[in-house]
Image (tube, rainbow, N blue to C red):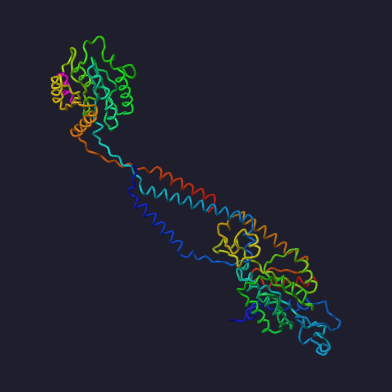
Amino acid sequence: MVTTPLLWLAILLGVLGLVALGIAFALPARSRGRAPVAFLTRLTALPAYVRARRRMLWGSLAGIAVICLTAAFALAGVARPTTIETISPKRHLRDVMLCLDVSGSMIEYDSEIVEAYLEIVDSFDGERIGMTVFNATGVTVFPLTDDYDMAQEFLEEAHEGLTSYGTTGMDFLTSTQPENVPGSSLIGDGLVNCVEAFDRKDEERSRSVIFATDNELAGDPLFTLDEAAQHAIDREVRVYALAPSRYFFPAYLEELEAAVDSTGGDFHSMSDGRAIDRIVSSVQATEARLTDGRLVTLFHDKPVVPLTGTGLGVLGLLVLVWRLRL
Amino acid sequence: MTALLTRIRARLTLHTHRRVASLLDGGWASVFHGQSLDFDDLREYVDGDEVRDIDWKASARHSVPLVKRYTDHRRLRLALVVATGRSMDAMSAGGEVKRDLAILLAGMAGWFAVRGGDEVCLVASDGHRTRLGRPESSEAGLEHILRRILAHRGTDDRSTVLDHLEWLSSRLRRRHLVIVVSDEIDLTDAHLRLLRKVSSHHEVLWLTVLEADPLALAATEDIPFDIGATLAGAAAGTVKAGATVPRLLAADPSVSRAYREAEEARRHDSARVLRSAGIVEERVGASAQALPAFHRAAERHRRAR
């Protein structure tokens, strides 16, 4: 948005200029003598004179137009057009990893979760997001990035792949289920994989994982969930769990809740698909509370258009003066 | 108001009185040499004839008054044909008002005539048409004539000396010394017939008061404006009559060149017309040039005879 903090000064100068012009016209002209001559038409009827007079008329009109334009541009410059940008520097130090369980038990929820992610991407401003999926093994869909267009592309492709069960779009099912790894839904391995996907480990950044899983383990993982949580704590990564609501196996979810609580994150139960964006925004709010969310307002001067206009106007005036030999 | 003639006389006296006297005392009469009407007869009275020339006895036997025609070398008459129209209120080349310059020229000519005992009459416009003034042979009468020229100051009259000459050509029978004092009117071949007619009947000297140069005025700190809308300007319809000349235009070399060329051509044309009509012309731009120009005119006229 463009604002003009010095608009009053521009208006003041403009009014002063108009007043000065008015006074100049109101005052009697310089005391030049008026000399009566006879037969002036012998001069004024000359074609050369008529031409010169017409040329002078057009020249003066052009001059007035250029002067008006130049003055308008100059006043626009005086008004100091400025764009205001509000940024939160800490946001740029935030990394959010979307960690999606694509095991058979979760696949029906995944497309909804990805849809929610797609909406969330729009609300991001400055944070880096990344995405990994896991089943028997973890796969990075896209690394941490603030290129939201790219993230959106990947998410759309992931959505397509998940709704079509891998026949079109991105196929997560075969890539996360290599033949040499026994079992599936290796939750602990998936979480460690997610945590390890964070880069710039030497920088002090706020790191969080949105961990969408039902915690239904089917196989023999290298890391248990608790070990994975401990790993996250070691890496100072908060894990926010996002689990579909299950009535039959509440023990898995209780285990998951305990694990994420230990990392400083929250547990969210996914009662319906619409709840996801609410959950993610609450994750963001929590992160914002935990990190310093101080806003910084930046004023960017935009003098290019007025200054260019003024410069061109002055050039035009010089050319006119030169042409008219004033 | 000081008398107009006093100032003129002072000027003439200042200017080497002896030279003036010698030149004009001799030159004056010689202007009028030849052309003596040697027969003594009667004719009908016309405007401008002396009342004392009327032959009352002969007139009594006629329906119209008759005048006696004399051969008279002593009492010659000077007809001053002076432009008094509104263009005379404009500036002359020297910066004076043209009317003042015309009064000076008319006064000089008149004073020489009066001092030589000759009569002077004024042919000028009265604002509507040409009038022939009463012949005067005294300095007071000459003063009166000059005042009549001055009295037309600020007039809206557009008449020129050509109108007066037209009038005069058919009215003045007696041979006069006609001294025309005019500004730079357009003289073309169309006027040649009239001028020839006048110059064959009378001795004609033409004194032209030069116009101010509007470009030179505009180039300095003056704004030249037309003293009145001339007919030519209204007809041309190019630039509003009475308009001023902006300084910027005066500086335009193409305008300046075109104007110089046009003026050159016009002056050349006017001079050619007068020359082919057998009329001696002298040009006066300022009062300082008046007397020398007058001398030159008289001298040239005498030699031409």
Vertical comparison of A270 with B213: above or below: above
Vertical comparison of A67 with B51: above or below: above
Overall secondary structure of the magenta section:
helix
Res B19 seen here:
no
Res B299 seen here:
yes
Check the picture and name the quadrant holding the N terminus of chain B. bottom right
Residue pictured at 43% horizontal, 44% vertical: A308
Highlighted magenta segment, given as a residue range: A225-237
Q: Position of residue B278 (x, y in %)?
A: 78, 68
Membership of A236 in magenta stretch: yes
Q: Check the image and name the residue furthest to the top.
A: A180
Q: Quadrant of residue A98?
A: top left
Asked whether B250 or A14 is in front, the reply is: A14
Asked whether B67 or B74 is in front, the reply is: B67
Q: In the picture provided, is A63 more to the left or to the right than B131?
A: left
Q: In the picture provided, is B132 more to the left or to the right than A137?
A: right
Q: Check the image and name the residue furthest to the front.
A: A247
Membership of A232 in magenta stretch: yes
Check the picture and name the quadrant holding the C terminus of chain B. bottom right
